[in-house]
Image (cartoon, rainbow, N blue to C red):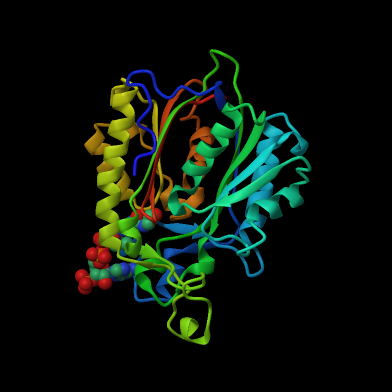
Amino acid sequence: MVADEETTRGGGRRFARPVKVAALATHVPPRVMTNADLEKLVDTTDEWIRQRTGIVERHVVDPGVGTSDLIVPAAKEAIARAGLTPDDIGVIVVGTTTPDTVFPSTACLVQHKIGASKAWGFDLGAACSGFTYALTTATELVATGAHGHALAVGADVMSSILDYQDRTTCVLFGDGAGAVVVSAAADGEPAIIDYCHEVDGSGGPALRLPAGGSLRPASHETVDQRMHYVHQDGQAVFKFAVRKTEEICRRMLARNAIEADQLDLFVSHQANKRIIMSAAERIGLDPAKVVINIERYGNTTGATIPLALGDALADGRLKQGDLVLLASVGAGFTVGSILLRWAF
Ligand code: UT7
């Protein structure tokens, strides 16, 4: 289950060469859906949503807009901010649960739309750990020397798989995209230090989209039974997320010989403000170092971490050289954590 025990305690991961996050950009669709809007659709209240989740509003796409449409502006901007052109990108890794279509992959659509003529790429399914898994994969593809620059993306149009008759799920999610350029770093430059991922497939039933895959292809029956929407056992996911976020962060800190108070910023997947704050408290993190922006976007699945990094950069909380810990827990269950020095 744990794929990374070769890492040396106290030394972090030994990459073949240093790799950094060279640039970041995000994009959300302009349309905002508030808690008051949801009060008109299901039996819920603004007060319940705020208290139980921290969410105030979320962005949702208009009909006809797919995940690749959200990625393209973020990808173009990230590449420009890195001082590159799309032709400099060697590989595109898209973490998404809501690809535009089963195939072609969203990475192929993005490659064409941004004109990354020399890139190959693929989608990666890790639900809410989509960004951490994509960033790790891109990092290793650059670290091996296979590519000078990679694009790692976390993006989802969750509104496309939400049942707006189910108050237990439809209030939780939103749409968004984030892209980072991952590049080889010079020795001594702030770089990615370590990563740690896990899967616990026994948690699959707790959060899933029951139909539309090979096991239960779309049929009148699956549509009638509302099986093409998110189904979740919220409390099971909540408990696992708090426990695992703490566990993976403690492991990451211990094997890099870092105390919690040495971190400058903790950027967790944004599924629920209570999950993030409970995990941060258990790890012993100063609440001032915890980034929370779920109130503006809801849970955007693959996009939450880049959106949180983007907001922290914009408001000056994230600066060059900062020691940053990323963490994610998602359907699967998938678990991810990345430790890095911020490079710009
Ligand atoms: O990204 C990874 C995936 N997702 C997560 O990490 C989510 C993890 N889970 C959670 O964040 C929380 O479990 C939820 C926010 C989903 C639910 O919060 P909770 O405190 O665990 O509530 P609950 O499921 O125990 O429900 C409490 C009550 C229930 O009513 P009764 O049975 O006590 O009468 C629900 O029916 O709240 C009710 N309820 C609602 N009421 C108003 C559930 N959803 C709503 C709603 N509005 N939207």
Residue 274 falls left or right of residue 310: left
- The C terminus, quarter of image: top right
Residue at 38 percent across and 56 percent down: it is 332
Q: Is residue 173 above or below residue 166?
A: above
Q: Is residue 79 left or right of residue 236?
A: right
Location of the N terminus (image quadrant): top left
Q: Position of residue 95 (x, y in %)?
A: 54, 49
Which image quarter: residue 63?
bottom right
Q: Quadrant of ligand 1?
A: bottom left
- Return the x and y of residue 106 as percentages of the image width and height: 64, 55
Question: In x, y percent, where is residue 177?
Answer: 57, 50
Q: Is residue 41 left or right of residue 70?
A: left
Quick check: 133 above or below 12? below
In the displayed structure, 116 sits above or below 218; it is above
Relative image position of residue 87 (x, y in whole percent): 77, 37
Note whether residue 292 is visible.
yes
Does residue 54 appear in this view?
no
Q: Residue at x 59, y 60 (%)?
A: 99
Q: Residue at x 52, y 23 (%)?
A: 191
Q: Is residue 250 left or right of residue 310?
A: left
Q: Quadrant of residue 250?
A: top left
Which of the pair 241/333 is nearer the observer?
Answer: 333
Name of the residue lying farthest toward the top: 188
Q: Is residue 293 above or below residue 201?
A: above
How many labels sit on residues? Answer: 0
